[in-house]
Amino acid sequence: MARKKEYIEEEVIEKAMALFWRKGYETTSMMMLEKEMGINKFSIYSSFGSKDGVFIESIKCYKQKLRQVTDKLKASSNGITGLKQYFYDFIEFSKDSTLRKGCLVTNSVNELNEDTNPKIKEELSKFTNTIRSLFANNLQQEVSFNNSEIEEKADYLIISMFGLASASRVFNDQQLNNYIENIFKSI
């Protein structure tokens, strides 16, 4: 007879996501995951297969949490103005009291190397492409842009978002505001 789980997977994944977001994928050990998630290694392997499995589920959890910001962008009919608001909204989303954690995906992409599990790379790429598509969709609301310009500007914005996510961990509000304002002067 199989043992009954004494934890809720969504809750332990949310704890794991917070740990990966704070510490990074590489730095996070199984021992740290056990402590943070409040379950033993056997339960982690049984439910998620491996540290990579926990991380992939954490990315999905992060995507769900970010929906409060991405849904607002999806619903926006303000073109560039809506995109600019997304950048400001993201800064607020990434705050953890007085500390900014950046973006879990950006932080993780900065750790990629040739040994990274291809499934992790794929999950991070899917996430990034989804955000880039949102940017392109909002740029289509601007009648002055042709398809080529929309694609080019969507690339510029996703790369700028990576820069903002990394910079948000170090720079102050005024510097981040200046960065966002200058990004959109270029659009």
Image (tube, rainbow, N blue to C red):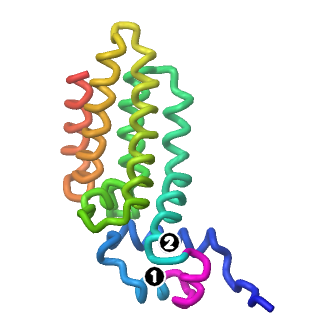
Toward the viewer: 107 or 117?
117
Q: Which element type, helix, strand or loop, lies under badge 2?
A: helix
Q: Amino acid at mark 1?
A: Leu
Q: Could you tell me residue 178's position as x and y percent? A: 20, 37
Task: Give the residue drawn at x 37%, y 22%.
Answer: 80
- Tell whether 160 sits left or right of 120: left
Q: Which element type, helix, strand or loop, lies under badge 1?
A: helix
Task: Give the residue drawn at x 53%, y 54%.
Answer: 65
* Vertical comparison of 125 with 145: above or below: below
- How far separated are the C-alphas under marks 2 and 1? 9 Å
Question: Which quadrant does the N terminus fall into?
Answer: bottom right
Q: Amino acid at mark 2?
A: Val
* Vertical comparison of 160 with 56: above or below: above
Q: Which mark is residue 59?
A: none
Q: Which mark is residue 54?
A: 2
**Which residue is tagged 1?**
33
